Image (cartoon, coloured by chain):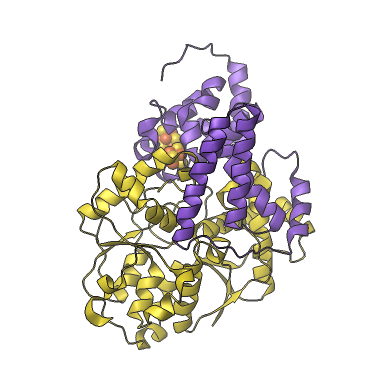
Amino acid sequence: MDLAYYPGCSLYQSAKLYNHQIKLVLGMLDLKLKELEDWSCCGATSAGKINDFMAVALPARNIGIAESTGLSELVIPCSACYSRTMVAQKQLQDFPLLKNEINFELSKKTTGNIKVSSALDVLRREIKGSRFKSIPLQKLEGYSPACYYGCMNTRFPYDVPISDNVENPQAMETVLEATGVKAVDWNYKTLCCGASSVIYNPEGALDLMAKIMRDAVSRDADCFVVNCPMCQMNMESQQDNFCEKHDIKERLPVYFITELIGMAFGLSKEELQPGDDLFINGMDWTDLCGDSV
Amino acid sequence: MASEPFEYTPQAADVFTQEVMARSGQNLTACYQCKRCASGCPVAEDTDMVTPNRLIRMVVLGDIENALTNKLTWKCLFCHTCGTRCPNNIKTGRIADTLKKMALDAGIDPQQPEYKNFHRAFFNYSLRWGRINEIGMMGEFQLRNMWDHLKKGNYVAILSEIMSKSTLAWKMFKQKRLHLSFHSSKGRDEISRLYKKSSGRKWI
Ligand code: SF4
Ligand code: SF4
């Protein structure tokens, strides 16, 4: 099946690995991702800090392009892009005048009606399908991930349909369980990591990340699994900083969910992480796979 | 929160509240101070006791100065924990966001000086190229910070800006997270027409 696909800026740059893995994993489930032609930045959280109109108009352009493909579903892996697009779409539906004003300037007009899903939504749906059941699963032994969702999977600045439990989301746990991995139960899976405030209020952000880390460690998690490029970047690149600040000795790798699913699907290290360009720091492959690599 | 008593003027309070309600899209007068928002707010430990419910009360009472300068307004992470827990569906994150914009409109300096520069740099970059290139965007951000220091004649800050940001960039580069490739979108023309249309609009 073909799905419209919006990678977003992160997945072209710092989270290139996620882009690569999503395509691989969904490809194995017979889903072909058709990247939107000439997509543009969704504005992330920044547009709305400066210009409320553009915070809707920027995603609207992409929704218009997605609708023009004739495909029924738009998949967005990045949580920030997903949140922005969901919110803009609902606002386009709720404010028809605004939609007209925006459409007037767009070459590909939007009706605001295409189904928007996160890559995680798609994965959770597909594990019930026959294609998934036909894939021979590799047993991934010996580790217990803490699934970390952050804010943008279930909490939105505007009322949109929410695809998971707001306080205790289960999508990643469900998907991992289907591949034979039991995630730990923990408290801080939806606490904010500080997002971009790590740049302009680093101390506050480090304190939040330390809380997340401390709880994961106390539950004996041995890695984080995430689906948001911002969370991944923060929890990984700031880990030494927040652990040193808060006297935490342990260190945990932070994987995109696609990394574990890909391994369970039997993809090799070379396929999942081809070359230096896509390396994630802290990844100790042998640790994860035991003797099988 | 140590603040001077202020004089309650119903009319001024009303005008201010109406503007915050219109710009944030939130019905502040529905708040009955149950404090469910307060208990979940991740930054409220560090805001001199200004919790989301108290921020709402400040606005409704027309305590404009405190509403625009208190720590919660500036530290709010837009995480929406308050909003999802509020029985009246009041998203205080959007109220704090609105107050930040009103403060900037009023010429009040942001409490985290780099807040404005970061979002400006990101937004402008996305308008200019249609997509974000992290190196370019961070470069614009850094220039904006340095320009601010320059205006104040603060040369030490310029030096530390260069040192700290280049350490970060170098770290990212070593971790293979900074990419030198450049990407952009041809939709820039459409985007700049939309941007022109947005000028002068205070809300969607
Ligand atoms: S949860 Fe809602 S009603 Fe209760 S104090 Fe907070 S804003 Fe007011
Ligand atoms: S959105 Fe802001 S006010 Fe609300 S809980 Fe998050 S940080 Fe606190």
Give the mark count: 0
- The residue located at (45%, 54%) in the rendering is B171
Q: Position of residue A168 (x, y in %)?
A: 33, 55
Q: Position of residue A192 (x, y in %)?
A: 40, 47
Q: Left of A103 or right of it: where is A19?
A: left
Which image quadrant is residue A38 in?
A: bottom right
Does residue A143 show up? yes
Q: Is residue A118 above or below residue B14?
A: below
- The residue located at (31%, 72%) in the rendering is A285
Picture colour for chain B: purple
Does residue B97 show up? no
- The residue located at (45%, 60%) in the rendering is B174
Q: Position of residue B169 (x, y in %)?
A: 50, 52
Q: Position of residue B198 (x, y in %)?
A: 74, 45
Pick the quarter of the image with the C terminus of chain B: top right
Chain letter for the yellow colouring in the rendering:
A
Quadrant containing ligand 2 reads top left
Q: Left of A62 or right of it: where is A75?
A: left
Pick the quarter of the image with the N terminus of chain B: top left
Which residue is at the front of the view, A6 or A239? Answer: A239
Which residue is at the front of the view, A106 or B9? Answer: A106
